[in-house]
Image: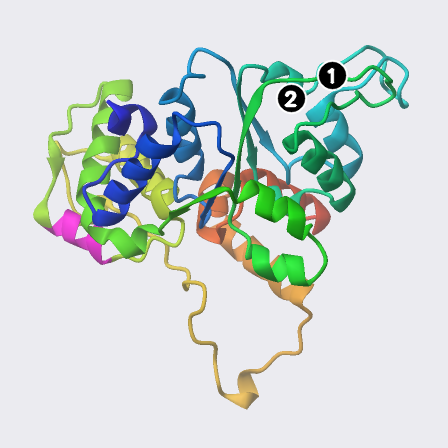
């Protein structure tokens, strides 16, 4: 049942190890830091921890720290009083109050503003907090689970993340491996998503051909489980046959991260990192026909991060 509800599908040693860690850690109140690439299933691990714990009847509140500006993040976490700042027309309950007797999941914790980290650390150490603009101390009973795809040790060395907060979050660390490191789980995951999408769409698709499964097993899946899910969903939506074959499995033609760059000096073009990123994001969007969820999976960033970069670089679809 844990497999089905959490979508932690697979029989690889890595998945079995994660499930064993969840079984041991879930009944405790220990803070957990989940690490792994974007799209690998970190939120699914967090949900499994919550719904396998004694807090399962309580709320499970998610907050993406990268999706909210620094000025609003503290208000989102701890709430604010009416008139605390421009636009605060009413009192607002923060995520920590909303998650009382439950679990709060802080995704992309490495993106949290430095000033907010100090207040979060105090709460994790058991101190009460105040709403923005308020003076009344508030205490809540909340378990904190955090996740990141960032190299936290490097961010700490650069002075962008508090070392003491990192240690407080890292009471228990669970590592979710990329899909390319557990290719044996690909057929089981593909069948899992196929059953889901045929059930949702009513399509009469029996399964995959051996060649289609081989094609998926040999692919590196830079977007991890999220990308596999999108590939199967697209195949179900577009297929005209009762069995999905090689032609139905449309994979990204983009180079994987770390792929070799041209070494011919004549091919060099003097570009800033921003311009390089801008061009790559645009090429990815054009490749996916501006399917932002698929593009974000290929780029290994969150959808909200992609939206911000599209706005920042003023990227527009041709004809719009």
The answer to whether residue 247 is left or right of residue 75 is left
Give the residues in magenta.
Answer: 211-218
- Please, is residue 145 above or below residue 215 in the view? above
Quarter holding residue 121: top right
Query: Which numbered mark, 1 or 2, is in the foreground of this view?
Result: 1
Local crowd at mark 1 within 10 Å, few (<14), some, or many (≥20)?
Answer: some
Q: Which residue is mark 2?
A: 96
Q: Picture coordinates of residue 34 (x, y %)?
A: 46, 42
Magenta segment: does it hold 125?
no
In this rendered view, identify the residue nearer to me: 110 or 275.
110
In this rendered view, identify the residue nearer to me: 219 or 38.
38
Quadrant location of the C terminus? Answer: top right
Q: Picture coordinates of residue 41 (x, y %)?
A: 39, 39
State whether residue 320 appears in this view: no
Q: Coloured how?
A: rainbow
| Residue located 28% across and 34% down the image | 238
Magenta segment: does it hold 214?
yes
Label tally: 2
| Residue located 75% across and 46% down the image | 114
| Residue located 69% across and 19% down the image | 94
In this rendered view, identify the residue nearer to me: 114 or 212.
114
Quarter holding residue 119: top right
Q: Picture coordinates of residue 296 (x, y %)?
A: 50, 45
Q: Pointer 1 and pointer 2: residues touching (CB < 8 Å)? A: yes
Q: Which residue is mark 1?
A: 138
- Please, is residue 11 above or below residue 89 in the view? below
């Amino acid at each position: 049942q844990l497999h089905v509800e959490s979508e932690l599908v697979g029989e690889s040693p890595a998945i079995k190890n994660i499930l064993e860690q969840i079984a041991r850690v879930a009944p405790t109140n220990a803070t957990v830091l989940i690490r792994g690439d974007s799209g690998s299933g970190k939120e699914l691990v967090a949900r499994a921890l919550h719904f396998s714990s004694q807090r399962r009847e309580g709320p499970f509140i998610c907050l993406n720290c990268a999706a909210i500006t620094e000025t609003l993040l503290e208000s989102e976490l701890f709430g604010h009083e009416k008139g605390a700042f421009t636009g605060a027309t009413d009192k607002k309950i923060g995520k920590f109050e909303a998650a009382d007797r439950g679990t709060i999941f802080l995704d992309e914790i490495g993106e949290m503003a430095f000033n907010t980290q100090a207040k979060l650390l105090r709460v994790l150490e058991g101190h009460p907090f105040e709403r923005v603009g308020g003076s009344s101390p508030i205490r809540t009973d909340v378990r904190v689970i955090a996740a990141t795809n960032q190299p936290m040790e490097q961010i700490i060395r650069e002075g962008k993340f508090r070392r003491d907060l990192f240690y407080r979050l890292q009471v228990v660390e669970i590592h979710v491996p990329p899909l390319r490191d557990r290719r044996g789980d690909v057929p089981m995951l593909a069948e899992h998503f196929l059953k889901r999408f045929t059930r949702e769409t009513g399509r009469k698709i029996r399964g995959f051909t051996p060649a289609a499964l081989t094609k998926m097993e040999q692919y590196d899946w830079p977007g991890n489980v999220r990308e596999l899910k999108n590939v199967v969903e697209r195949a179900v939506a577009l297929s005209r046959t009762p069995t999905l074959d090689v032609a139905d499995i449309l994979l990204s033609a983009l180079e994987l991260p770390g792929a070799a760059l041209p070494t011919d000096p004549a091919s060099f073009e003097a570009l800033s990192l921003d311009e390089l990123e801008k061009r790559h994001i645009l090429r990815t969007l054009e490749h996916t026909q501006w399917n932002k969820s698929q593009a974000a999976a290929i780029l290994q960033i969150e959808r909200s991060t992609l939206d911000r970069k599209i706005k920042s670089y003023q990227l527009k679809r041709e004809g719009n």
